[in-house]
Image (spheres, rainbow, N blue to C red):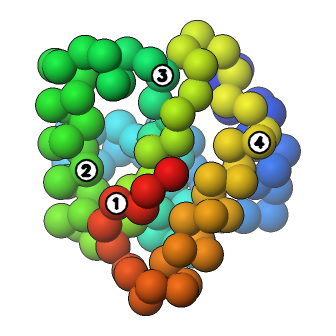
Amino acid sequence: MWKYEEISLRLYGTPHEFEFPLDGFVFDLFLRKDRMLVEFDGNYHRADYAQAEVDRQKDFVATSNGFTIVRIPVEAGKAIPAESFSYIEYARQHIEETGQDAGAVPA
């Protein structure tokens, strides 16, 4: 998918799956080794109440199934920049330092 082309290069060699289905929702990215679900959120995720509610439901489903959820702000309608990978690295470090194995990681 076109929007994942840039970040795909940074994920080379990392077991992952884009558009990962879970309990009726689709998450942007699943990192298998980390049991981490990543959502790339455009501005409308913060500006639209209905979308914010869907995001809360997705977070609940993810954490209830033992996944860590990471939400990364991006510009809507554009490819996910490779720099977004730094958020994923931050989340990995945060989990390692805090011992947190599931939940929402601040981006």
Residue beneath label 4, please?
Answer: 83
Q: What is the spatial separation of the Cα atoms under label 3 and label 4, in whole angstroms?
A: 15 Å
Q: Residue 104 — which label?
A: 1
Counting residues from the N terminus, which is met first, the one under dot 3 or under dot 1? 3
Q: Tell me the SS state at disc 1.
A: strand
| Labelled pair 3, 1 in contact (Cβ < 8 Å) | no
Dot 4 or dot 2: first in sequence order is 2
Residue found 84% across the figure and 45% down from its top: 9
Q: Are marks 2 and 1 in contact (CB under 8 Å)?
A: yes
Mark 1 residue type: Ala
Count residues near mark 4 (Cα–Cα under 10 Å), then give few for <14, some for 14-19, many for 20+. Answer: few
Q: Which residue is painted at 45% across and 69% down in the image?
A: 35
Compute the Cα span from label 4 to label 1. 20 Å
Q: Earlier in the sequence, mark 4 or mark 1?
A: 4
Q: Foreground: 84 or 10?
A: 84
Q: Which residue is mark 2?
A: 59
- Residue 22 in the image, given as x and y percentages of width and height: 29, 49
Q: Tell me the CA gap for discs 2 and 3.
A: 16 Å
SS at mark 4 in the image = helix
Residue 23 in sight? yes
Can you identify the residue that label 3 sits on? 42
Q: Which of these two is toward me, 86 or 16? A: 86
Which residue is at 31% across, 66% downward?
103
Q: Earlier in the sequence, mark 2 or mark 1?
A: 2
